[in-house]
Each structure stands twice: as C-alpha cells, then as structure tokens.
C-alpha cells in the first residue's frame, strides 16, 4: 500500500501550527522540512521548538536540509519526532548520526539529491530504514519534477528490493504513478496538498493516482 505524507515547509511558527492542525485529520504522518539557508537557499522555522509545544495525533518525519545535522539532533531528540531524514550530501559523519538516532530508538533515512551518485549511499544501506529520493532540487515547495530520478529509483530498487523508497518533490497525480512503478512506496507531497482548497480531496486524489 502506498503511503501519502503531507509536507510542511514554512518560516512562520504560527503557520507551522496551523498546517499541523489542517493536515492532521487526513494523515497519520506529517513530513517537516527544515532548512538552514546554507544547504539550500531557504530558511525555515527551527522546528524542534514548534514541535515541543504541539500535541498531535500523528507521527512526524523530520527532513534536515542543513549543512551540519549533528548540531541540531540533540534538540530534536527532546521532541517526539519519529523518523529523521539526513542528506547524504551534508557535512556530517553519517555513521555517527545513524548510530545516535538508533540509540534513541528513532528511525533514520538518507536523502539523495537528483544529481548525487548512488555510490555515495551504498555503504550506509544496512544501517538505515529507508532512502528518500529527492525528485526536485530541494529548498522550496513547488519545484519542477526531475524526470531523470525515476530511472535512478528503478535501478536502486532492483539492487535493493527490500529497502523502503520514499520520494519527495513535485509529487502530484501526474508524477506519482511512475514513481510507484519504479519502486517507491512512500510519497511526500507539499504544495499539491497544502495549497489545495480541499486537503482531504487532494490526499485522496494522490492516493488513487498512486495506486492505479
């Protein structure tokens, strides 16, 4: 079964809280995009501060689009965020981060940008719970879908058929089917869902498109 995960990317604490409330009735999981203004040309809320005072009946994924994720992890580990996504391209000791998150009973995935070689993540596969393929160039919602990533996903899935594949960026009813066919089982969608006048209908349309 395909999992549709709505995404939040904002620099406003009030908007963050508002979006959690809007999305909560239609999903069991929310994807929080965090940007430091260096790894990507955008800056968001810190996230861990906002999440610390929100009570919600959903799980949270935290996507750290930051140069040094290790500098933020301690703050995040005081929240109830469930899964963490670290970029393979970040300036970090990935093995240490993976080990630290596992020690705190959190799940961890590696994110891969469109132009990053899969060779960069091979040695980490056994330690992570999933791989997130960026299907746009990261930093902003509403980016243009990068079709070339579909073939990369397919090749990865053939090599590692048991690894969960998540896709993030430019996900809509037109792009979703090719990603599922390539091997993805989790789709993160930001602007298509969040900017829809009817969030519930947007989630359902995306789910139906992905499962057809």
Image: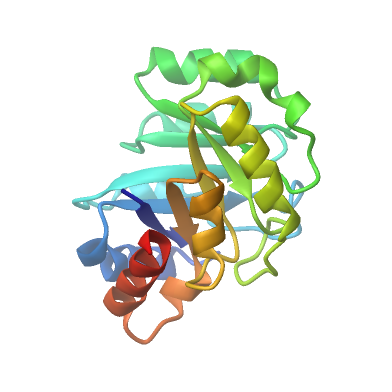
Residue at 60% of width from left, 67% of height from top?
141
Q: Give whichever of 150, 119 is nearer the camera.
A: 150
Question: Can you say whether 101 is above or below 183 in the image?
Answer: above
Q: Is residue 10 visible?
A: no
Q: Residue 158: where, in percent of width, then height?
A: 59, 32
Q: Relative to 171, say whether 168 is above or below.
A: above
**Residue shown at 57% from the left, 35% from the top:** 157
Q: Position of residue 70 (x, y in %)?
A: 61, 26
Q: Is residue 154 visible?
A: yes
Looking at the picture, tell me which residue is in the foreground, 171 or 8. 171
Residue 8 falls left or right of residue 53: right
Q: Is residue 4 above or below residue 81?
A: below
The picture places residue 134, in percent across and down from the top left corner, at 64, 50
Q: Quadrant of residue 103?
A: top left
Q: Residue visible at 53% across and 56% down?
A: 45
Identify the image quadrant of the C terminus.
bottom left
């Amino acid at each position: 079964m395909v999992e549709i995960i709505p995404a939040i990317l904002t620099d406003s604490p009030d908007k963050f809280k508002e979006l959690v409330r809007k999305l909560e009735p239609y999903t069991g999981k929310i994807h929080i995009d965090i940007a430091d203004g260096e790894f990507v040309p955008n800056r968001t809320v810190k996230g861990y501060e906002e999440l610390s005072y929100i009570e919600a009946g959903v799980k949270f994924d935290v996507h750290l689009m930051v140069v040094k994720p290790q500098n933020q992890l301690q703050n995040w580990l005081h929240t109830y965020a469930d899964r963490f996504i670290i970029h393979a391209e970040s300036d970090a000791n990935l093995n240490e981060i993976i080990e630290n998150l596992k020690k705190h009973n959190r799940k961890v995935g590696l994110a891969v940008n469109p132009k990053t070689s899969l060779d960069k993540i091979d040695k980490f596969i056994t330690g992570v719970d999933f791989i997130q393929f960026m299907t746009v160039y990261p930093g902003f919602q509403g980016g243009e879908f990068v079709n070339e990533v579909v073939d990369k996903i397919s090749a990865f899935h053939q090599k590692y058929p048991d690894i969960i594949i998540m896709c993030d960026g430019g996900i809509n009813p037109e792009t979703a089917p090719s990603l599922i066919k390539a091997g993805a089982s989790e789709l993160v969608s930001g602007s298509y869902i969040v900017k829809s006048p009817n969030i519930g209908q947007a989630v359902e349309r995306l789910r139906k498109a992905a499962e057809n």
